[in-house]
Image (spheres, grey):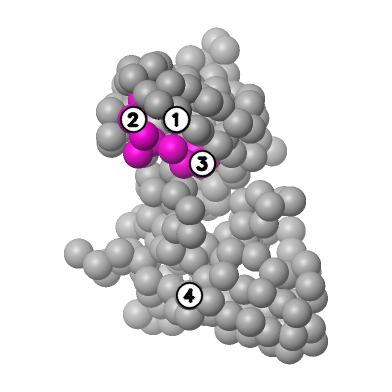
Amino acid sequence: AQSVTQLGSHVSVSEGALVLLRCNYSSSVPPYLFWYVQYPNQGLQLLLKYTSAATLVKGINGFEAEFKKSETSFHLTKPSAHMSDAAEYFCAVSDHTGGGNKLTFGTGTQLKVEL
Amino acid sequence: KAGVTQTPRYLIKTRGQQVTLSCSPISGHRSVSWYQQTPGQGLQFLFEYFSETQRNKGNFPGRFSGRQFSNSRSEMNVSTLELGDSALYLCASSLVIAEEQFFGPGTRLTVL
């Protein structure tokens, strides 16, 4: 079975500082990995995805993530945090084997951006 | 292009009642998945439909059911509601299997 672990349920950074949100996955097959963001009272918005192409993936709003197979990690980074980045972030792995489309999510990381 | 729409956005029901939630995927998308989000359990997969066929089902009791219509619109039904069914129910659509899923705003269900 596939799983995702997000280290740190709450992360706080200063505006302009580096954002680093950690995600480790477990998968018996080459994974498809995703980062989603959720603002209060809204659905999930896709930030970026990894589907076995380039290991460094660039997404929207200046976010990027690097797939490291040796570390089974897919950490999300942004060089300079903005107040509008405050939200909850979810890492997810796709169970695409057998033609399925099921996403397994991590427990989420709440990002707080302080002045 | 319009995004995924879900109706209603908010629902209040009492224990024992049943509820039907609706989801309209992005035009052209044939895969629709449903997820339940609660503070305690996080985001959990309910089921997935593709071309009117259920392809995957999560670990939920039989009270939770769904279907997909020929126009790809989907509904999920929860019968005999329990307090623990209070959650945000999210629908997501994708063009094909194994591509990124796009989420709707969700339906907030409160069971009293």
The lab-note entry on whether marks 2 and 1 share a chain reads yes
Q: Name the N-terminal-most of marks 2 and 3.
A: 2
Query: Going by the image, does A19 lie left or right of B55?
Result: left
The CA distance from mark 4 to mark 2 is 29 Å
Callout 4 environment at 10 Å: few (<14), some (14 to 19), or many (20+)? some
Q: Chain of mark 3?
A: A
For the N terminus of chain B, which image quadrant? bottom left
Q: Does the residue at mark 2 contact the one at mark 1 (Cβ under 8 Å)?
A: yes
Task: Establish whether labels 4 and 2 are both on one chain.
Answer: no
In the picture of the structure, the residue carrying the numbered disc 4 is: B9
Q: Considering depth in this image, is B49 or B1 the residue closer to the camera? A: B1
- Is residue A63 rendered to the left or right of residue A94? left
Identify residue for label 2. Answer: A82
Q: Position of residue B109 (x, y in %)?
A: 62, 73
Q: Which residues are magenta?
A: A81-93
Q: CA distance from mark 2 to mark 1?
A: 7 Å
Tell me the distance, in whole angstroms, between the alpha carbons under discs 1 and 4: 29 Å
Q: On the image, numbered disc 1 is attached to which residue?
A: A113
Q: In this rendering, which labeled residue sits more in front, label 1 or label 4?
A: 1
Q: Is residue B75 above or below residue A80?
A: below
Label 2: how many residues lie within 10 Å, few (<14), some (14-19) or many (20+)? Answer: many
Circle 2 chain: A
Task: Read off the residue under disc 3.
Answer: A88
